[in-house]
Image: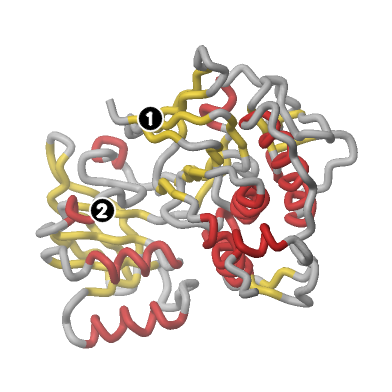
Amino acid sequence: MTITRTDVIIVGAGPVGLFAVFELGLLDLKCHLIDILDRPGGQCAELYPEKPIYDIPGWPSISAQGLVDKLLEQIAPFRPEFTFGRMVSSLERLGDGGFRIVTDDDEVFEARAVVIAAGGGSFQPKRPPIPGIEAYEGGSVFYSVRRMEDFRGHDLLVVGGGDSALDWTLNLQPLAKRVTLVHRRPEFRAAPDSVNKMQALRDANLLDLRIGQVVGLAGRDGRLASATIKGPDGEIEIPCTRMLPFFGLTMKLGPIAEWGLDLHENLIPVDTEKFETSVPGIFAIGDISWYPGKLKLILSGFHEAALMAQAAKRLVSPGERIVFQYTTSSTSLHRKLGVPD
């Protein structure tokens, strides 16, 4: 069994989870982030990447994706490791006081501390209203891409009009036998550059674009053979051996609810000194945490991350003297951040 060991496991790679890497990194703690999405940024990147945010200090206005990009730039000196497209399925306490986490793909991670920064819980894909789709899930129908090679040589049907649908249309087009993108209307919510690239491939007859909805699937033994698309001109059946539907995401607390933590209306109560949960060594920050007076703001999550990091350092490095330092004046912090002398 291969085990990935680190100082702190962060469950959730949204803005608060990313900033936690910075605060922990200043204290020489190495982080590994696990997220069910296929990229960093949480709901900011997945649901409204171009939406402006107005309450980030120092930024009169910044797009959600812009904020994520800046956070990634800020934490780059600490070289965090990421595991995307995975849900944490189980957590157990080890004899040395640390924790073992296993993902839904049976990957194993161990750390002295765990930080839950999962927003309102894990994002889980919405199942499209297509009759009989359940029979093909996991065999021919997938809601995320874990291995691009699994789509090589297949007739691929991508359904949706957002960034995920367009990104995977473009990324998998060179591998698939043929890609068909289906969206219910001609307008797309994805980044304009992605839309332009998709339309260029369509114009070059390198992929197909259908306006309409998938209304039926055909196949046997969990293996797709074709899909029926209903559009403005009626129904058409196309070959389809793999399908990627992107119908948005829903929030669920998921396996976290089974970790033995005290819960308050599907949120995790914490103290406001350390942001530790009812289980010592497990912290919760961001929207998933709860305490009297809690405000669900990214700004609040940043504050929570700073205090959590101090407590995590004392846990991971017991007995080590912690000297509080300011990034503006500390030469040792400057060295960690790569600031020129």
Q: Quadrant of the N terminus?
A: top left
The amino acid at mark 2 is Met
- Name the amino acid, label 1: Val
Query: Eyeballing the image, is 308 above or below 266?
Result: below
Instruction: Specify the quadrant that holds the C terminus.
Output: bottom right
Residue 300, given in percent of the width and then of the height, sits at: 79, 51
Q: Quadrant of residue 120?
A: top right
> Residue drawn at (27%, 74%), measured in percent from left and top?
209
The disc placed on residue 243 is 2
User: Considering depth in this image, is 55 or 276 the residue closer to the camera?
Assistant: 276
Q: What numbered label is drawn on residue 253? A: none
Residue 48 in view (yes/no): no
> Residue at (31%, 83%) from the top-left corner?
199
Q: Residue at x 46, y 72 (%)?
A: 190
In the picture provided, is 130 more to the left or to the right than 118?
left
Mark 2: few/some/many CA within 10 Å (<14, 14-19, 20+): many
Quarter-wise, where is residue 314 in the image? Answer: top right
Instruction: Judge from the rendering whether residue 106 lies leftward or rightward of residue 264; answer left or right.
Output: left
Residue drawn where x is 63% and y is 67% of the image: 67
Answer yes or no: is residue 299 visible. yes
Q: Secondary structure at mark 1?
A: strand
Q: Compared with residue 153, is residue 106 higher up or lower down, i.e. above or below?
A: above
| Callout 2: SS | strand
In this view, the residue in front, 116 or 237, is 116
Q: Residue 212: horizontal and vertical position, in percent?
A: 35, 67
**Residue 13 position in % (x across, y down):** 54, 50
Q: CA distance from mark 2 to mark 1?
A: 29 Å
Q: Indicate whether 223 appears above or below 97.
A: below
Numbered mark located on residue 108 in the image: 1
Please state the horizontal and vertical placement of residue 33, each as a whole percent of the image: 50, 45
Asked whether the residues under the numbered discs 2 and 1 touch, taking CB atoms below 8 Å apart as contact, a structural biologist would say no
User: Does residue 103 appear to the left or right of 70 in the view shown?
Assistant: left
